[in-house]
Amino acid sequence: MKGLERLARINGGFVTRREVLDSGLWDSDLTRAISAGEWTTVRRGVYAPTASYAPLDSRDRHLLLLRSVLAESGPDYVATHDSAVVAGGLGDYGHGTYELDLEVAHIARVGGTTSRRTSSIQYHRAAVHPDAATVIAGLRCIGAARAIVETMPTTSLDAATVLASSWLASRRSEVRRSGMVELFDEAEAKRHLHQEVAALGLRRGVRTARAAIDIADARCESVGEVRFLVLCWEYGLPRPRTQLEVPLDGDRYAEVDFAWPDVRLIIEFDGMLKYDEARAGGRPARVTVGAEKRRERAVRDRGWHVGRVTWDDLLPANRERTALYVRRELARAARLAERAR
């Protein structure tokens, strides 16, 4: 089986059973290699060298699965829904795959097909227009906006808003790289998503998709931040400003996660990701924590009140309590702002 590792690299990480047999090996050789842990079954009839497959995260494993499915399905099929979202690098802000269905490859056929699911493939019924297909990293996919819109009705409001926000953030980043971020029109981008949703008709989950687009924000930088916006919407809290720059001394400023400038309240989302990234970059977590405390002190010195929420605060069992906490902080900040006038 060692001679097939080069072919696996050429294929994009896998070989098929037919390729194994064509190389002069037998099914018994394949069975022994799998039993020895040298090769791993990706799906029925498709295998990958364990040394290269085992280190892959869930996103990259799904892309390998998708690559093998599209190679077998032929040129009339394209990745859609969750698979196209993953191929486009959307839906997770670069960390994990929040609530995406990666157990199967999601594909659709130009001209349409019947909807059915196998152990490794979800065939979607909707026809794909040839002009709607694109190629991303060598994979045939529907466009990013269409992929987001097709996936949003199939998931929760939290996850749908993460999808919409990640697409908006990607569009904003594209404009930003050109040096003209001021030209990014978030309202226009949302209108485009709403038009795509309207084309879905009365499909189940469309109301969720519409709400998600309304809640979504291009400036959110993590799944946790998006979920906090959803919480505010669900419990009727005033929508905060996101990534607001608070002036400090001189030319310095602090960019905060959420702010209500009229009452000078800031809520920061404390995900562990920032501390994990600091450790990965060689900075001890205590250094990052210390910098955060100094930054918060500087913001408080400018007359702002600061509160914090964590991932646990956004869990279903804790959401109502968290909403009450934010409501109390808003009321408290409003009283302090009134006294200061």
Image: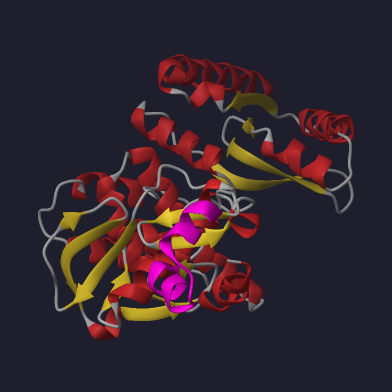
Q: Quadrant of residue 215?
A: top left
> Along the line of sight, which residue is nearer the eye, 249 or 17?
17
Please identify the dominant SS of the magenta region.
helix
Is 93 in front, or is 240? 93
Q: Residue at x 13, y 53 (%)?
A: 203
Left or right: 125 in relation to 232? left
In the image, is residue 103 above or below residue 294? below
* Depicted 291 relative to depicted 221: above or below: above
Q: Which residues are magenta?
A: 16-33
**What residue appears at the point 16 percent right and 56 percent down from the top-left corner?**
116
Q: Position of residue 114 (x, y in %)?
A: 11, 64
Q: Position of residue 272 (x, y in %)?
A: 68, 33
Would you place residue 217 above or below residue 178 in this image?
Answer: above
Pinpoint residue 76: horizontal percent, then vertical percent.
25, 81
Res 179 seen here = yes
The C terminus, quarter of image: top right
Q: Residue at x 31, y 51 (%)?
A: 152
Give residue 141's quadrant in the image. Answer: bottom left
**For residue 144: magenta?**
no
Q: Position of residue 142 (x, y in %)?
A: 33, 73
Q: How is the image coloured?
A: secondary structure
Q: Is residue 218 visible?
A: no
Question: Looking at this rendering, what residue extends furthest in the bottom direction?
Answer: 131
Q: Is 61 placed left or right of 276 in the picture? A: left
Identified at 31% across, 65% down, the residue is 80
From the viewer's side, name the closer residue of 114 and 133.
Answer: 114
